[in-house]
Amino acid sequence: MKPFARFATLLAALLCQAAGAAVGLTQLPADADHGPVTVYYPSASAAQPLRRGPFTLTLAAGGEPARGNGRLVVISHGSGGSPWVHANLATALVDAGYVVAMPEHRRDNYRDPGTPGPESWKLRPAEVSHAIDAVAADGRFAPLLSLDQVGVYGMSAGGHTALSLAGGVWSPAGFKAHCDAHLVEDFQSCVGLATRLTGGWLDGLKKWIALAIIDHRFDDATPQAYSDPRVAAIVAAVPAAADFEMSSFAHPRVPLGLVTAGRDAWLTPRFHSDRVLAACAAACELVAHLPDGGHGSMLSPLPPGLTGLVGDLLNDPPGFDRSQLPAVDGKIVAFFDRHLLRHDAGSAATPAQP
């Protein structure tokens, strides 16, 4: 980006913040092949308390879009996820001038959690591309955005989506091989919320049934790969990653950052995020590490009242301090600022004028 163009883009974002811009919210409709896309964006309209599921958020529902920094970030939610559990990160991004789009991943969302795991992972990267297309086709946002450099953030299964877009290659058979070798050590990664090991006499039967199902359903060794040339920077948080060919992360397609949690009980770090970091070494960046964080610690706001197995996996471990999360969100925003607002001289990165 030429110096004046970059200055103008940053100035527009600063003026938007100085004017007290609110966070707008709208939903782009579903079609026959894709779920709806929730959009957070800078808005000049007044924000009001808004109830969404168990959360009360202060947003300008349907508010008039305001010009930000001209860039889009797509957030890919985890298994059974919703647009609301990433509202704080979305707000931080919007406050920095970004428009944020969240696709509802088909049959792996809070309204329909029917097909998590590899069957969903095959579809998710294309659903990110669809979200970009949907925003580009919307007359409210298209004039405010330049979509040649898009950011992607994903958490958990969304982190798997993010790693796929970064150039990661995986297969269902890779998932099967991991579970065959490490079922006990990474049990919840392999079986999700279906059951848990308790140390009781039924554990042997649970392991036998789990492996029988996994071996039957996930024997396809066809390499899965996906790219979208518009995606220019990626952050993967506590990603599902054990099924990837780790060599595919040696040279990520685009700048890749990771957010990790030391007490993740759902995706055991040494099989997932730690392996990715070791594989990409100097080619990627550790954006933030939460040594006392659990798998759900990046959900912000965290759903209240989680009990049973889902509560054990997603609630914060004892001693985890949620007051650090705004700083983590700030590090994610800074990562995207470095890689989406800085371009070679002569590139056309300023937003189109309405």
Image (spheres, helix red, strand yellow):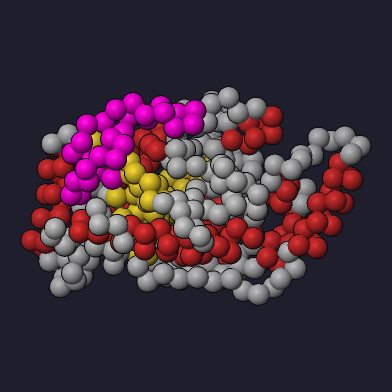
What segment is highlighted magenta in the picture?
41-68
Residue 14 figure quarter: top left
Answer yes or no: is residue 334 visible.
no
Is 224 left, or right, of 130 in this rendering?
A: right
The residue most toward the front is 32
- Compare residues 317 and 64 and report the one nearer the observer: 64
- Compare residues 70 and 127 and report the one nearer the observer: 127
Q: Residue 221: x and y, percent?
A: 69, 73
Identify the residue at image location x=38%, y=41%.
89
- On screen, 331 above or below 124? above
Residue 195 figure quarter: top right
Is 330 left, or right, of 3 in this rendering?
A: right
Q: Residue 340: x and y, percent?
A: 28, 59
- On screen, 184 above or below 146? above
- On screen, 271 above or below 227? above
Answer yes or no: is residue 83 visible.
yes
Identify the residue at image location x=37%, y=71%.
229
Is 67 left, or right, of 171 in this rendering?
A: left
In the rendered image, residue 67 lying in the magenta stretch gets the answer yes
In the rendered image, residue 176 lying in the magenta stretch gets the answer no
The residue most toward the right is 201
- Compare residues 25 and 72 and report the one nearer the observer: 25
- Compare residues 65 and 13 and report the one nearer the observer: 65
Q: Residue 144: x and y, percent?
A: 20, 56
Identify the residue at image location x=41%, y=28%.
51
Pick the quarter of the image with the C terminus. Answer: bottom left
Pick the quarter of the image with the N terminus. Answer: bottom left
